[in-house]
Image (cartoon, rainbow, N blue to C red):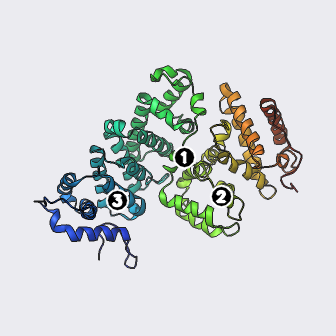
Amino acid sequence: MVSKLVKRSTHEAENPHEVTLRESFLSLEPQLRPPFPLTIPTQEQYLNLNRAILYGILCEPHLAKVHIKHLHGIITDGYGYFTSILVRIVNEMYGKLIDSVKRQLVWVTHEMIYVSAIGLDGLLVALLRQIVGGDFGEENLWWCYEMVNLFSSKWDCLLEDAPLILTGALYVFLRLLADHCRVLNVPKIESLRQMEKDFCVRMLREKLFLCLRIGRDLVRLLQDLVQVPEFRAIWKDLLYDPNSFGTEEFMDISQLYNTRTSKWYFLLRINPEMESQLRFLLTHVKFGGQKRYQVWFAKKYLSAPERNGVVVDIVRFLCCAHHPSNDIIHSNIIQRWAVIGWLLKCNLKNYVEANSKLALFYDWLFFNEKVDNVMNIEPGILLMVYSIPKYADITNSLLEFLLILLDNYDLERKEILLRGISTAFHTLLSKGVIQSLDVLTRCDMLSPNLKERLERLLSECSAIKGSLRIPTSHVMSCA
């Protein structure tokens, strides 16, 4: 049977969820036309009717208004089940949905916002996650446009019913703007870029108290847009005129530095399929057997140069949103640091490589053992340590980058960075992530200048922490 929901090749099996929806629709089709039955359905009948109506909305656009009125008339659970079906369709089937179905998906989402449906936040998250970073194809740009239009047009409703989702949208659109602002003279991107700017500037200017919930990664995203006039002005006010935002609780940018960003935000920039592939790699694939998986992953997600930008999001996801169990850590399964090392070797553009390293070390700069997780900084130290001796160039590059961050990231608040890096090293040692820093301080494969600067840093760290020491036992041989 030809699918009205998804694109499917002749020999491809049907999606079980699609089959269930279609069967519900076909079994109840006579009841989906007015006049509607007045009988009260049983629980099973109610669920079946929800599925049938949703299938009708998606596959019969000309009757969508009839179907939605029917839905409003029979709903008894605040649209909770209806919304849950929508979320499943988006997460499992979005990539194969027929274009007309995608348009209906946007339309019905507007309707769910209007009625403040239960589960609305989960639906909006699912929709945002389908935006592909670095993809400037017509279909993906259309989806970006629909999403920013949805969040802009439903501003008041979302502010009242789902304010946290607005911060998620801000995170997504700031991240997309960094890509879109690097593409010039493409009319479709120019109009989209302006809509994204308008939404983000409005959020930051009018609702900074909400934006503060994002935490330190808000600063990371804004710095990538500092060359854009609208955001340069916001950046200056964050640094020098915090009162201009009219938010009493915001007094200095260091408040954002000290607020850890929830992993929820990092998941917004990784679509469900990519997340599934990465988690599979890090829970089932053994060291030595990862190459074919990496080749497949790179071909699917990193093949075009403009797609490089997603590496920044992947690194942040790996550091902060995927924390392996102790069993995995002590097994022969490939570890996060190794995947990040591979990604950094994927012929990245210079700015993408720099932003990826910043994503790797960002929590080091402001690390506070009371609020931060050592697993967020573990990949950085292990990648530096285990890259010796075979990939000493990576160790040199990463260590130099960390030292440059300390000296240049925020000159006026360098003591915050020094305290953060000091605490990071101390915690990595005290938690046993590494037994010693000798592999870095005594390794002949590292630049003498780097080792000297590292020794100076560790001396400053010792002065701050008091108890920080550099054990003499080696983690591994440098030979």
- Identify the image quadrant of the N terminus: bottom left
Residue type beneath disc 2: Val
Q: Residue at x 34, y 48 (%)?
A: 118
Residue 228 visible (yes or no): no
Residue type beneath disc 3: Ile
Does the CB distance between marks 1 and 3 fall below 8 Å? no
Q: Position of residue 390 (x, y in %)?
A: 79, 59
**Res. 70 image quadrant:** bottom left
Q: Along the line of sight, which residue is nearer the eye, 279 or 307?
A: 279
Kindly report the distance in space between the C-alpha atoms of the residues bearing marks 3 and 2.
34 Å
- Identify the image quadrant of the C terminus: bottom right
Badge 3 crowding class, 10 Å Cα cut-off, few under 14, some 14 to 19, many 20 or more, is some
Q: Residue at x 53, y 29 (%)?
A: 235
Q: Position of residue 274 (x, y in %)?
A: 52, 59
28 left or right of 420 in image: left
State whether residue 293 is above or below residue 126.
below
Does the CB distance between marks 1 and 2 fall below 8 Å? no
Q: Identify the residue position indicated by label 3 in the image.
A: 85
Q: Identify the residue position indicated by label 2 in the image.
A: 339
Q: Identify the residue position indicated by label 1 in the image.
A: 263
Does the CB distance between marks 3 and 2 fall below 8 Å? no
Residue 202 visible (yes or no): yes
309 left or right of 408 in image: left
